[in-house]
Image (spheres, grey):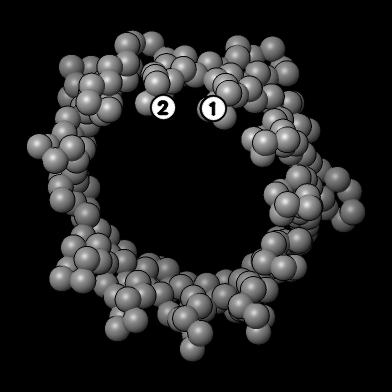
Amino acid sequence: YDSLGRLTGVDDGHDHPLEFEYDQQDRLITEHQGWGTLRYRYDACGQLNRLRLPDGSKLDYHHAKGGALTAIDLNGARLTSHTFLAGREQHRQQGLLLSEYAYDEQGRLKAHAVGKHQHPLYRRDYAYSLNGNLDSIADTRHGQRSYQYDPLNRLIRVRHSRDQQPESYAHDPAGNLLMQDRPGPTIIKGNRLLMQGDRHFDYDAFGNLIRERRGTGQKLVTEYRY
């Protein structure tokens, strides 16, 4: 991090480290990794209006006066078109594919449909319980999923309509996830997760996660520095 607390680099000891640069308005302007660099440009309102890819290609973002995204161009050719109403996307045109979105009176997504030449290809419907939890998802490709919660509104079971085994979840009194239909035990001490399945977690004296070990012999290690 730099003196302003902005992330300037990520290095996990493998592959190529990441480096970030910012402008005077604290906006990300470059992202470097190995041979490739992403370059970001913004308009006078601070909205992203161009992204230059490592191969030199350009993505241009167009916005309406209110700030809503209206279109994205790739090297001058229209890639997607968007229609927003009250901050919510209503339509998205991607080549010959048209995505349409519908919302309930509380602004929650209730339907997403994809069609081509007015011919429906795919649809997903969402239903919510009276206390606001996601109750079910009906998907024309993958069937229906139903969600069950405990009295504290924590997810405890997911059922699938296409004869798949249900997923089960359990929590301790502090709300920590204890079980997720995965082999191996789960150990929590001091309100910190120490082990789940084949994953082991190590912390420093301040409780920050510093290491995750997994795989055969715990040879796959991810380290975190602060």
Mark nearer the N terminus (1 vs 2)? 1
Residue positioned 69% across, 24% down in the render = 146
Residue farthest to the bottom, as pictured: 44
Residue 208 seen from this side = yes
Looking at the rendered structure, the secondary structure element under dot 1 is loop
Report x, y in % for residue 78. 66, 72
Q: Which residue is at 67% across, 66% downward? A: 87
Of residues 67 and 15, the one nearer the viewer is 67
Residue of label 2: 175
Asked whether the beta carbons under mark 1 and mark 2 sit within 8 Å of each other, the answer is yes
Task: Report the amino acid beneath label 2.
Answer: Gly
Q: Position of residue 71 (x, y in %)?
A: 65, 73
The answer to whether residue 112 is left or right of residue 226 is: right
Q: Secondary structure at mark 2?
A: loop
- The kind of residue tagged 1 is Leu
- When the figure is inspected, residue 90 is found, relative to residue 121, above or below; the finding is below
Q: Nearer the viewer, residue 186 or 215?
A: 186
Q: Is residue 106 above or below residue 78?
A: above
Is 123 on the left or on the right of 21, as rendered? Answer: right
Residue on which disc 1 sits: 152
